[in-house]
């Protein structure tokens, strides 16, 4: 991180369950043009494009990136790490800038899952086909397993999960990128049907489509632009087999080891020694309330045994940093773009451009990314101040 990098442009489409009126190229164009306009640049200033796109089967569209993102004459490559795709794409672009491949890069992530007819079937078959098939592991049952472990080990309750879901829904009402935000109360969550105990329907993220783009550049190219300076950015991966992560001495299934280590490294890059008091804004890539709780300790905001007390403060936004002022993935989760959206939201916060969801005095923010069975983890710290 000795060579500073900054985000100087952000563009987002409106997010909704399905964009039936726009093709992927049109969505990408909307986000990219908005990001370039924000940066005050034309496409001729872009030396590299990194696309974050899901596999074709999840997108429901063949060769999604080749039709919509790749551009003749500019180097391009595609990244996919599940829910961490967007943040992994940003880290890839930063690596290329550090390596001297380009001075300015465009990162764009798009999601079209509303067009897929078998997405849930794919999610239900992503786990180990030999060792884990006998317990019918699926995306929802994986989340339920972890939520149950958290309840047994630390004393979380259904009300904690419902409280976070309700808080995120209230925050989403101020987010003008979400076309149809959902508002519900704690009682609404608790009265909704179970997907797999203890996960209620209103606690789960909705199907979402849209595109997000950011322009990143070397510090010496920023000039007088309003920039979000990347102070730390790290990513790590883990085994995807859930059983292998149950009883490891370095941490169990609910300890999010790769996120913790990514966050620790990003904090070192940023010169942060006490994460508890470092951040004004935290955007967590957590499609479920229990997933958000696991990230608190991994980010160093509290110790694991303090999680219940910290969560009760976080529900009322009394935990120090404002958590998920955008509403987070529980309000809007276009999977391939969702981790980039977290970074974009943090960038807009420290630039003072977050509109109705702006947190007063936001100067330092951290965004997480989690993909697959949380085996891919990223942590990106941005600041209003140049390193």
Image (tube, rainbow, N blue to C red):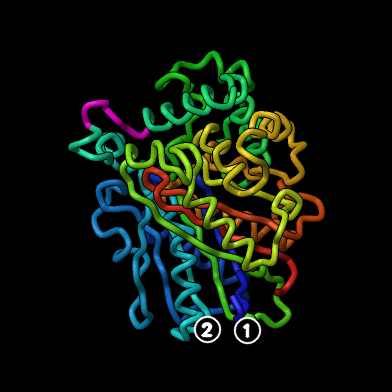
- At 34% from the left edge and 65% from the top edge, which residue is drawn? 78
Foreground residue among 192 and 274: 274
- At 40% from the left edge and 60% from the top edge, which residue is drawn? 52
Residue 345: x, y in percent?
62, 54
In which quarter of the view is residue 273 placed?
bottom right
Asked if residue 295 lies left or right of residue 249, the reply is right
CB within 8 Å, label 1 to label 2: yes
Residue 36: x, y in percent?
56, 71
Indicate the quadrant containing the N terminus: top left, top right, bottom left or bottom right: bottom right
Indicate the quadrant containing the C terminus: top left, top right, bottom left or bottom right: bottom right
Asked if residue 385 lies left or right of residue 221, the reply is right
Residue 134: x, y in percent?
21, 27
Q: Which residue is mark 1?
A: 221
- The region drawn magenta spans 133-139
Question: For the residue labelled by badge 2, is the local secondary structure a helix, a strand or a loop?
Answer: loop
Q: Is residue 177 visible?
A: no
Asked if residue 72 lies left or right of residue 371, the reply is left
Residue 135 on the magenta span: yes
Residue that protrudes farthest toward the front in the picture? 249
Q: Is residue 380 above or below residue 98?
A: above
Question: For the residue labelled by badge 1, is the local secondary structure a helix, a strand or a loop?
Answer: helix
Q: Judge the density around disc 2: few (<14), some (14-19), many (≥20) Cα neighbours within 10 Å.
A: many
Q: Earlier in the sequence, mark 1 or mark 2?
A: 2
Q: Which residue is mark 2?
A: 103
Residue that protrudes farthest toward the right in the picture? 361
């Amino acid at each position: 991180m000795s060579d500073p990098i900054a985000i100087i442009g952000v563009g987002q489409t409106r997010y909704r369950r399905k964009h039936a009126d726009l093709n992927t190229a049109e969505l990408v164009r909307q986000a990219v043009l908005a990001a370039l306009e924000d940066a005050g640049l034309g496409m001729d200033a872009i030396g590299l494009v990194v696309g974050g796109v899901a596999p074709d089967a999840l997108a429901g569209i063949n060769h999604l990136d080749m039709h919509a993102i790749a551009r003749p004459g500019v180097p391009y490559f595609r990244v996919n790490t599940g829910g961490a795709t967007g943040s992994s794409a940003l880290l890839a672009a930063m690596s290329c800038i550090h390596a001297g491949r380009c001075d300015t890069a465009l990162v764009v992530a798009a999601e079209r899952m509303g067009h897929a007819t078998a997405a849930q079937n794919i999610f239900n078959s992503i786990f180990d086909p030999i060792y884990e098939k006998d317990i019918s592991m699926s995306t929802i049952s994986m989340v339920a397993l972890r939520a149950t472990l958290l309840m047994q080990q630390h004393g979380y309750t259904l009300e904690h999960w419902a409280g976070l879901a309700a808080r995120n829904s209230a925050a989403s009402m101020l987010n003008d990128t979400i076309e149809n935000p959902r508002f519900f109360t704690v009682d609404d969550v608790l009265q909704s049907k179970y997907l797999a105990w203890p996960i209620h329907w209103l606690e789960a993220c909705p199907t979402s489509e849209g595109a997000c783009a950011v322009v990143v550049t070397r510090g010496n190219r920023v000039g007088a632009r309003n920039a979000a300076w990347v102070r730390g950015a790290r990513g790590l991966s883990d085994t995807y087999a859930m059983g292998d992560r149950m009883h490891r001495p370095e941490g169990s299934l609910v300890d999010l080891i790769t996120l913790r280590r990514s966050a620790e490294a990003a904090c070192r890059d940023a010169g942060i020694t006490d994460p508890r008091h470092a951040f004004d804004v935290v955007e967590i890539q957590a499609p479920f309330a229990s997933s958000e709780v696991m990230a608190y300790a991994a980010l160093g905001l509290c110790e694991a045994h303090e999680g219940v007390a910290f969560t009760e403060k976080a529900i009322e936004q009394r935990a120090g940093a404002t958590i998920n002022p955008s509403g987070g993935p529980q309000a809007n989760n276009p999977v391939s773009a969702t981790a980039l959206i977290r970074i974009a939201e943090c960038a807009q916060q420290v630039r003072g451009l977050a509109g109705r969801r702006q947190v007063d005095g936001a100067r330092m923010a951290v965004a997480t990314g989690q993909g697959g069975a949380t085996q891919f983890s990223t942590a990106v710290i941005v600041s209003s101040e140049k390193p």
